[in-house]
Amino acid sequence: MVRTDWTLDEINEIYHQPLLDLVYQAATVHRNWHPASEVQVCTLLSVKTGGCPEDCSYCGQAARYHTDIKVKALMSKEEVVSIAQRAKDAGSSRFCMAAAWREVRDNKDFDRILEMVEGVNDLGLEVCCTLGMLTEDQARRLQEAGLYAYNHNLDSSENYYEEIISTRTFNDRLNTIGNVRKAGISVCSGGIIGLGETHEDRIGMLRTLATMPKHPESVPVNALARVKGTPLADLPKIDTWEMVRMIATARILMPASIVRLSAGRAEMNEEEQAWCFMAGANSIFTSESETLLVTPNPGLKQDKEMFDHLGLKPMVRGKQKAVS
Ligand code: SF4
């Protein structure tokens, strides 16, 4: 049964149990709800890079930080659709387009995004976008163009959020997620660990996700990618066991959701990633450019080898039902 009434005490108990017990419980839940050998392969493409007015302290695309990231204008629809075709040919079933914007504006750029959504949807891929804050009307227009999912991460707990971002509020995040839901678009929302938050913050963030009236159909769990020039660049690398604990808890709380092992894979070896799959992760990002937006990510060949070693196979496109 999918539950949306998890208490902090219950989540605490799950999260803090001995790691092997936690992984065993999560692996059992995973096998009850999903084919455990199938992993959704998503391609993430930055269609507009850098120059963002926001101040997310982990992000190399924020204009105010002095990073090596080059600003790139919005790509053409043709370029995006041809990259999406190659991603499909390489085994991706979901294609996510990201633009470094604070919010969507009703202008020519948004019209071009709508055309991209139509073009990628026509290829038979699940189309996802992450474009910043969205109004109800913009969400509706994206849905009409064929958008399947929208990514909008919580990033951290409500308590820790303002330590990380000051240019918009936690409630702004929830409002956008609400607008996406109202338009009938599938929700992709998770967070990042390694931002200097406490275990309580991680548990708090998981509680917000797991007590939404409907769980996000897709829950990305990211490890901070430390980008030189950002305020968080010097934080220590997150330990893999912390990722495993987070993924396993997410899997138990939101059994029907796809849990994505997202940023951080570039710093993990195959064995470490295998632990994450055992703990219930069943989605990854891959990219032909070996980058995840602006940070390193394993390449297609490396991922294929890992899948062969672990007996994993790409999930075929199957639109998930709403999870609760
Ligand atoms: S995370 Fe998104 S909103 Fe925040 S600075 Fe980066 S591109 Fe802008």
Image: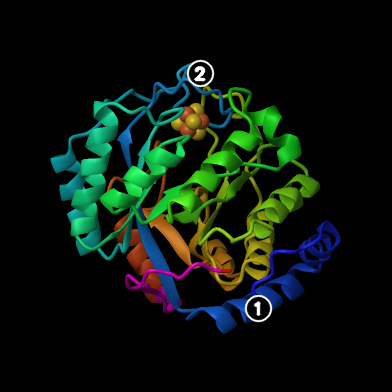
Q: Looking at the picture, which amino acid does disc 2 mark?
A: Tyr
- Number of numbered discs on residues: 2
Residue at left 58%, top 73%? 278
Percent coordinates x, y for residue 85 in the rendering: 18, 56
Q: Which stretch did the figure color magenta?
A: 309-323
For mark 1, what is the residue?
1
For the residue with label 2, is its CB less than 8 Å from the closest atom of ligand 1?
A: no
Characterize the local packing of mark 1: few (<14), some (14-19) or many (20 or more) Cα atoms within 10 angstroms: few
Q: CA distance from mark 2 to mark 1?
A: 45 Å
Closer mark to the observer between disc 2 and disc 1: 1
Q: Is residue 275 left or right of residue 304?
A: right
For mark 2, what is the residue?
65
Quadrant showing the N terminus: bottom right
The dot on residue 189 is none
Q: Is residue 104 above or below residue 143?
A: above
Circle 2: element type = loop
Is 316 a magenta residue? yes
